[in-house]
Amino acid sequence: MLTEKGLWTRLRTRLIFTGPTLFAFATVMIIPFLYGIYLTFTNWDGIAIDQNFVGWDNYIGVFKDTVFWKSFGMTLEYVFITVVLTNAVAFLLAYAVTRGMKAQGWFRAGFFLPNLVGGIVLGFIWQFIFNQVLVFAGQKMNLTLFSTSWLADPDKAFWALIVVTVWQYAGYMMVIYIAGLMNVPKDVMEAASIDGASNRKMLARIALPLMVPSFIVCIFLSLQRGFMVYDLNVSLTSGGPFKSTEMVSMHVYEQAFLARDYGLGQAEAFVLFILVAAITLLQVYFSKKLEVEA
């Protein structure tokens, strides 16, 4: 049984190793988060010294802000499409580069490379591609789809954002799926092969069920990145044309820092946090029920 001196020594030792990390986490995450919740009950404009208490007015304003909910609805559509396409492309790439093809290591590196490019830089690169490269190719080859810039069309600009998002994140998710495929027990696959199961059946009935943890992680990350998209949104489309691609994170930023209604912007950010947390927790909860053991 530990004495009082022993308990103090253990506590001091833990504080020496974990204290700086806990202090940094509290300073960077916990305190700003709690302060942000406090600001949702004020009318602060982000500049003035005074912060007048307004109660629940900002939260009422969130539900009255039709632009916020329009942006959130558009973001839901964007998230759904990008989650499906990103994970489908990532899994197909992972499956292709784990089949023993030549130079598969180079292919893995190449597919992962877009994830290393920052969202701002990536947006400007693809802005040049959509405005110059594809338009030039479309006009030269009489391709109606690319004869005009996608970024100038309200309908096509949304899909341009999706294309770039999938291109950026598919390689990252591919790495997770590769790990999942490599961890499928080889003896189970060999036994199924001996029993006469085709590659398609082994994939559908053995590999995929055993890879549920990989799918949970990838879908969770895809959801989180989809809802929080901002840098790519700003650099590629700037929310245009005519706010047809203004995602909810961009709207919250504009509400807080451009409209200088920090209380309402912070309230919208907190409501967004609650909604995203609820969606991701439900996704993890229901996905966990699909897990099987080898």
Image (spheres, rainbow, N blue to C red):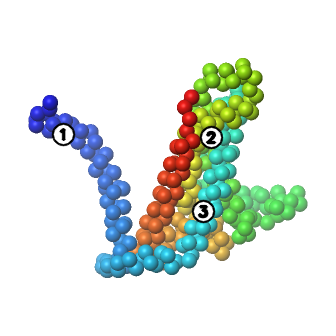
State the CA–CA distance, disc 1 to disc 2: 43 Å
User: Position of 110 compared to 28: left or right?
Assistant: right
The residue located at (19%, 39%) in the rendering is 11
* Closer to us: 117 or 87: 87
* Closer to us: 148 or 210: 210
The residue located at (62%, 32%) in the rendering is 181
Residue 233 is marked as none
Residue 12 is marked as 1
Locate residue 15, reporting x and y percent.
Answer: 23, 42
Location of residue 281 with respect to 199 vertically, above or below: below
The answer to the question of whether label 1 and label 2 lie on touching residues, with beta carbons closer than 8 A, is no
Kind of element beneath mark 1: helix
State the CA–CA distance, disc 2 to disc 3: 23 Å
The residue located at (37%, 66%) in the rendering is 36
Locate residue 89, reporting x and y percent.
Answer: 69, 45
- Name the residue carrying label 3: 76
